[in-house]
Amino acid sequence: MKTIKRLLLTIFVLLMIVTAGVVTFAATPLSSCQFSGHVVSNVSSEGVGPDTDATSRLPDNHVQYVEATDRLRLAYRSYIPDHPKAVVLFYHGSGANSGAGYQPIGEQLSQNYGIAAYLPDIRGHGLSDGPRGDAPSVQQVYNDVTTMIEEAHRQFPSLPVFIGGHSAGAGLIINYIHSSGHQPVNGYLFVAPDFGPKSNTMYEGNGNFATVCIKALVAHELTFGLAKGHAAGVRYNYSDKQLKSGLGLIQYNSVNMASALNPLKPSEEVAGIDQPFGLWVGTDDEIMIPRKVVAFAALASQVKDRSLIQMVPGEKHLTILNDAAKYIGPWVLQSAAHP
């Protein structure tokens, strides 16, 4: 009996030591994460955004708002043709917003394909309210996607709805598919998708696009989301020129936001995709390794035969946005016609 008591006491002491270590680790001040201001991304934004094409300068009347479940205002840009055949919700990538080069997608889907397009600003980005790059919780970001889907159904109750995104916007949708309370849709759209660092689909160093504070992310995970949620988890290495371009880019995402946008178990999550999808990645992408992205997408075996997975010659991580609608539009119309 004494041996058992001694063993239990030893286990208890070890648990206390481990718990204390985790709490201490998680409570370490944010200053322990050093982000170098000298690292600049080699992902070019030349040829992308409103400065390159007068037709993509978005008038204010495209911007609308919807109320999130926590009463915060979410902005989205709306492009509605006279007689829409389907609805597309398309999310922007890391540190960006719907007005930072995504307008051609909405304009072309509406004008050329008769598809109603909503381009949301993730909370804390663009014209949406909230602290820049932050969220009260990971689940709240997913709830915001549900709010947008419900808004699409409210405005067009008889139309099929497709959701997708570019880069980390695609990562958000992959996470959303497996989140609590997610709403069913008719299909998914992934453009230069970020399947997360554990997918090994990025070039080493990810083109210097982002610097990650591993310490903060690990502390958040070890404490089951209780610590470090609002700490800076990722720094996007935009140049001063890009940050001052008027595109409204932000440089930091909190741990909560970064966790919402990056699949943590990508193999399981991609394998569990429940609806057909279209996926397009440029052959000259500076962040993603195209052939690995295509191979990884094939894990979605249950919907692979009904999905479209393509490498687009000559396109880079951002330039693909200029012509993304001509890939998305036909696939959406075909999928809507033959569900």
Image (spheres, grey):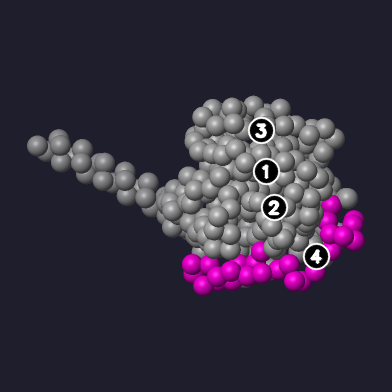
Residue 148 screen position, x and y as percent: 57, 60
* Front-lying residue, 239 or 27: 239
Q: Which residue is mark 2?
A: 115
Q: Amino acid at mark 2?
A: Ile
Q: Which residue is mark 4?
A: 58
Residue 229 can be seen, yes or no: no
Q: Which residue is mark 3?
A: 308
Residue extending furthest toward the left: 1
Determine contact: label 2, label 4, CB under 8 Å.
no
Query: Which region shows up in magenta?
Result: 48-76
Residue 77 can be seen, yes or no: yes
Q: Which residue is mark 1?
A: 333
Per the model, the C-alpha gap separating discs 1 and 4 is: 25 Å
Q: Pointer 3: residues within 10 angstroms few (<14), some, or many (20+)?
A: some
Q: Earlier in the sequence, mark 3 or mark 2?
A: 2
Residue at image x 72%, y 45%?
A: 329
User: Dot 2: what SS?
Assistant: strand
Determine contact: label 1, label 4, CB under 8 Å.
no
